[in-house]
Amino acid sequence: MTGGWPGFVVAAIAVAVLLVDNLRTHRLRDVLTLGGLMATLTVTAAVSVLTASGQPLIGALVGAAAMFAFGLAHEFTRPGMLGFGTVKAAALVGAAAGGLGLHPWVSALGLMCAGYVALIKLAERRWTDMPTSPLLAAGLVGAVVSTLVVR
């Protein structure tokens, strides 16, 4: 499915900006997470309209909602571990990977889960000041690799 690539590129740029800002400030700011999510969904919607294919937009919406739900469930089961900035950023990654299809979305989710488990293990050793945006970037890379390998 080629329709999801423009939205993915927008999301990749947004995650790159989030990565730099997160490494500097140790925060994922709403203006970047929600702005990136809205830009990704807007571009994906425009491409879906122009190509007369709703599949990328539906995938992006479902992917964003599912990844947000995953992040929210994680935040409620381990309060304070991720923070709501990471939960919103997970929706951004879910939208980007979901617009590409199911395989990239599952790959992104798997890489992010592995990263979260590593983060939990580090936190148990009292190393809690670790930025989470590298995990999001790994999820996006996994989505690209999955798309290129599976197709």
Image: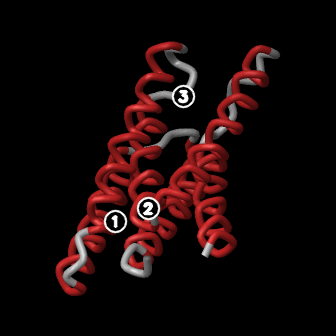
Q: Which residue is mark 1?
A: 40
Percent coordinates x, y for residue 2 in the rendering: 43, 81
Amino acid type, mark 1: Thr
Going by the picture, which residue comes out furthest to the bottom? 50
Give the spatial CA distance, label 2 vs label 3.
20 Å
Q: Residue at x 46, y 44 (%)?
A: 90
Placement of the N terminus among the 4 image quadrants? bottom left
Percent coordinates x, y for residue 78 in the rendering: 54, 14
Relative to the observer, which residue lies in front, 137 or 49?
Answer: 49
Amino acid type, mark 2: Ala
Relative to the observer, which residue lies in front, 95 or 87?
Answer: 95
Percent coordinates x, y for residue 133 in the rendering: 59, 47
Pointers 1 and 3 in contact (C-beta within 8 Å): no
Dividing the picture into quarters, in which one does residue 128 lie? top right
Going by the picture, which residue comes out furthest to the right? 125
Give the spatial CA distance, label 1 vs label 3.
22 Å
Q: Residue at x 64, y 40 (%)?
A: 131
Dividing the picture into quarters, in which one does residue 65 lie? top left
Q: Which residue is mark 2?
A: 96
Disc 1 secondary structure class: helix
Q: Which residue is mark 3?
A: 82
Q: Residue at x 67, y 68 (%)?
A: 145
Looking at the image, residue 16 sits to the left or right of residue 73; the answer is right
